């Protein structure tokens, strides 16, 4: 029996990502594919170099479309259940990188409907408020406002409904019950919701690439089963690992457990306190033992966060790993390095966020891609 669980609504246990590839029937993001991408871009993002995005469906077809001049577009999303934390940023950071490298359109779905339907504690006013704050967080990463469209399901449903009906007609109850584990007590809104997450994969008449955490893959299994029967491409997907919670390497950060996460609105003092207090250590019980035996970077959360997200320099990250394993770098020193990196990132982020506050409408209603999507939709 597997000791971990990964679904759109629950991630728990120590995740074996190789087993997860087998369970979900995806493919490992091999070095050969990354080398092909590097030949087209000149470099690779940290998330790709360090296997943060580790799995895929049909990424090879995305590369072929690029080489054949067909291009592609990007689609990802956010479930607005509360303030965003660092772990939520992974798909948006890599989407921005792809957008910059290839001049791509990016569609970002804010699933306020799903969060309202799934949560007993959120009403539509809550999900709307979180949606707008999350959308501002996302655009503050620096997306191109002429090539990015952010939309709330509850608002954009008038444009998506015809196509969502076509999707719904192709998907039966037994399928969504088997894929998502729905029960007889599941409300009927949740049964219909997957159709709305599938619809943006048909926004353009070319292939769509979805950068997402691996827990979202069940939606794309259904999409890929029905896409061609609707005259569209099967979605291509690249899956990310989870930035581990501060409290250890099992599961993922949780919005309901503040001690597991660093939020985008956490002050420098809060960041320091959380990391010093909660970040799980791979070091020894005493300084003397650590100097003698060294630490384990595989379970040290401060190192894992630096490796996966915050230390760009490959040589520097290798030095940190070797120094920690040899006992030359202490746990407190590793945590201090991470604190400085995160606070630097968050200061820059919040400065940009204030500048983007008055530009949100450009991404949602008034920009070039936004206007195109609001005024015209594919009636097919």
Image (spheres, grey):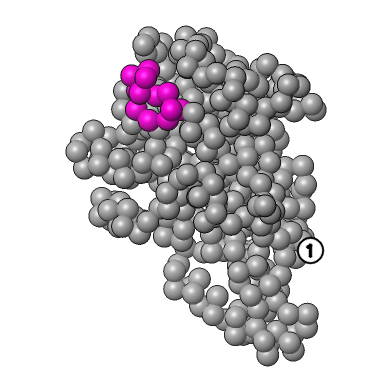
SS category of the residue bearing label 1: helix
140 versus 232 height, above or below: below
Residue found 37% across the figure and 18% down from its top:
230
Left or right? Give the position of 302 relative to 73.
right
Residue found 58% across the figure and 41% down from its top:
215
Residue 261 position within the rendered picture, expressed as x and y whole percent measured from the top left: 70, 51
Residue found 60% across the figure and 85% down from its top:
326
Q: Is residue 229 magenta?
A: yes
Left or right? Give the position of 348 relative to 104.
right
Please identify the quarter of the rendering in which residue 225 is found: top left
Residue found 77% across the figure and 47% down from its top:
257
Residue 107 in view (yes/no): no
Left or right? Give the position of 104 relative to 355.
left
Residue 367 position within the rendered picture, expressed as x and y whole percent measured from the top left: 42, 23
Q: Is residue 192 magenta?
A: no
Work out which residue is located at the far front of the displayed protein and give it. 1
Q: Magenta residues?
A: 223-234
Q: Nearer the viewer, residue 356 or 183?
A: 183
Q: Which residue is mark 1?
A: 277
155 versus 29 height, above or below: above
220 versus 87 height, above or below: above
Q: Quadrant of the C terminus?
A: top left
Residue 93 position within the rendered picture, expressed as x and y whole percent measured from the top left: 48, 46
């Amino acid at each position: 029996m597997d000791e971990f669980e990964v679904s759109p609504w629950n991630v728990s246990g120590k995740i074996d990502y190789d087993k997860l590839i087998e369970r979900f029937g995806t493919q490992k993001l091999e070095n050969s594919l990354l080398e092909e991408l590097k030949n087209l871009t000149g470099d690779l993002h940290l998330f790709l170099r360090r296997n943060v995005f580790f799995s895929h469906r049909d990424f090879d077809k995305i590369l072929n479309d690029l080489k054949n001049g067909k291009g592609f577009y990007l689609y990802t999303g956010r479930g607005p259940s509360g303030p965003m934390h660092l772990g939520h940023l992974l798909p948006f950071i890599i989407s921005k990188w792809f957008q910059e490298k290839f001049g791509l359109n990016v569609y970002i779905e804010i699933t306020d409907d799903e969060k309202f339907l799934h949560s007993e504690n959120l009403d539509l006013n809550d999900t709307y408020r979180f949606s707008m704050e999350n959308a501002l967080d996302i655009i503050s990463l620096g997306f191109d406002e002429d090539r990015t469209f952010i939309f709330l399901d509850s608002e954009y449903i008038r444009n998506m409904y015809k196509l969502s009906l076509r999707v719904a007609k192709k998907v039966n109850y037994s399928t969504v019950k088997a894929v998502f584990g729905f029960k007889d007590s599941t409300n009927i809104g949740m049964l219909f919701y997957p159709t709305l997450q599938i619809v943006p994969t048909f926004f353009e008449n070319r292939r769509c690439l979805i950068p997402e955490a691996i827990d979202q893959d069940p939606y794309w299994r259904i999409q890929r089963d029905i896409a061609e029967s609707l005259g569209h491409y099967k979605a291509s997907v690249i899956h990310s690992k989870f930035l581990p919670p501060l409290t250890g390497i099992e599961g993922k950060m949780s919005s309901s457990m503040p001690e597991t996460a660093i939020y985008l609105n956490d002050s420098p003092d809060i960041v320091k306190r959380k990391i010093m207090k909660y970040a799980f250590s791979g070091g020894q019980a005493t300084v003397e033992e650590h100097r003698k035996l060294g630490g384990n970077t595989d379970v040290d959360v401060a190192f894992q966060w630096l490796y996966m997200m915050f230390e760009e320099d490959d040589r520097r990250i290798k030095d940190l790993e070797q120094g920690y394993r040899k006992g030359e770098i202490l746990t407190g020193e590793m945590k201090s390095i991470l604190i400085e990196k995160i606070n630097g990132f968050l200061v820059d982020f919040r400065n940009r966020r204030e500048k983007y506050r008055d530009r949100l409408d450009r991404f949602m209603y008034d920009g070039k891609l936004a206007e195109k999507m609001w005024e015209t939709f594919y009636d097919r």
